[in-house]
Image (cartoon, rainbow, N blue to C red):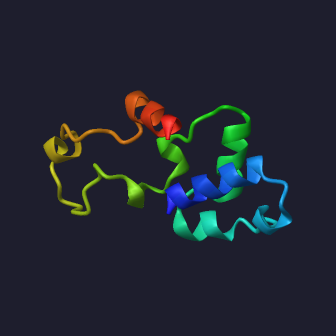
Amino acid sequence: MAFKKFGLAKVDLITTDQKYKLKPCTGSFEKTQGIPRTHTIKECLLQDKSLEKEDFHRQWYINESCDATSTEENRNSTMEDPFSTENVEKMKEI
């Protein structure tokens, strides 16, 4: 879903065709889904900024456990951070 929003934001920046321009934003997508809306992603692109882990609701964190009784060891596992600088740079290249 976030990749689709990124694509829509990129298209909005490069097109003049009103058919593909973003519609006015209500903000409801970000509030209900916990994922940055297309307008937020567009602003990041315009400002040459990256989205941060905190821009997503914690339900989307890959290394967070759903088990409330998980141990500290599980929470600090060596799973790759999708928001690491290296991974963010890879995504910018796409």
Say which residue appears at 51% left-offset and 55% top-offset: 3
- In front here: 69 or 87? 87
Seen at 47% across and 39% down, the residue is: 91
Kindly indicate the quadrant of the structure image that contains residue 23: bottom right
Q: Residue at 67%, 70% (x, y): give it.
A: 28
Q: In the figure, is residue 7 to the left or right of 11? A: left
Pick whichever, 34 or 25, lies toward us: 25
Between residue 14 and residue 72, name the one nearer to us: 14
User: As displayed, is residue 32 above or below residue 17?
Assistant: below
Q: Horizontal and vertical percent for residue 64? A: 29, 52
Horizontally, residue 88 falls left or right of residue 18, namely left
**35 on left or right of 20:** left
Residue at image point 40% right, 58% down: 60
83 sits left or right of 10 in the view: left
**Image position, residue 31 (x, y; %):** 61, 66
* Image location of residue 1, percent across then percent down: 50, 63
User: For residue 73, what is the image quadrant?
Assistant: top left
Q: Position of residue 59 (x, y in %)?
A: 40, 61
Q: Front-most of 73 and 40?
A: 40
The tally of labels here is: 0
